[in-house]
Image: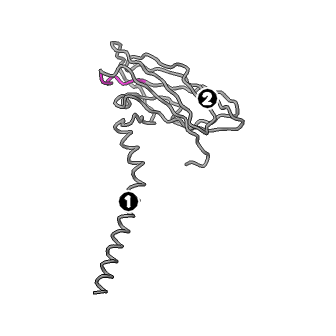
Amino acid sequence: MNEQQSQANKKLALKLVWIIVGALLFAFALVPLYDVICSVTGLNGKTSNIAQTAGKQKVDTSREVTVQFVSAVMPGLGWNFYPMQTSVKVHPGQVTVVMFEAKNTTSEVVAGQAIPSVTPGKASAHLKKIECFCFVRQSLNPGQVKQLPLRFFISADLPPDVNELTLSYSFFPATDDAN
């Protein structure tokens, strides 16, 4: 009977180890899986970081959409960052350029990476960025001021009930050792 109890305990311990290993693997896979789901569906306002081209996009002059711009700098970056225009009115399909300005307020070289977000979430799949400072890491020398362009268009298949959207950029510190 003691041998049976010992075998049962070993089986239980092995099952518990497999459950822990499975939970750890699931936890590590959750973040990339969430990013993929958000990029594909536009969930949580996450936009794609892939350059888009207007191609043969037709401009819908019968409709106007207001695009507002919001910016934030996360603690530890030491930058001032803001849009040169707080909003623009665009026709779907019309390529528009908006400038942002970043200034390093520290006495050392500082690098940052911008993360975009679009509200409402259902509009994020329709905001197509052709050129964006968010595609690459930005580095500023001490006191340097840099103009950062954003070239984009809103696809003509934007739902008709969306007349206004907000594009928000948050700049986070980027380190040299991050790969």
Q: How has the structure been colored for display? A: one colour
Left or right: 124 as drawn, with respect to 116 = left
Mark 1 crowdedness (10 Å alpha carbons): few <14, some 14-19, many ≥20: few
Q: Residue at x 39, y 16 (%)?
A: 91
Q: Which of the 4 image quadrants contains residue 19?
A: bottom left
* 7 or 28, nearer to the observer: 7
Q: Which residue type carries mark 2?
A: Asn
- Specify whether residue 84 is painted magenta: no
Residue ID for mark 1: 23
Residue ID for mark 2: 80
Label count reads: 2
Left or right: 4 as drawn, with respect to 168 = left
Q: Residue furthest right?
A: 107
Residue 107 in percent (x, y) is at: 72, 36
Numbered range of the magenta stretch: 153-160
Q: Is residue 15 above or below residue 118?
A: below
Q: Is residue 144 above or below residue 8?
A: above
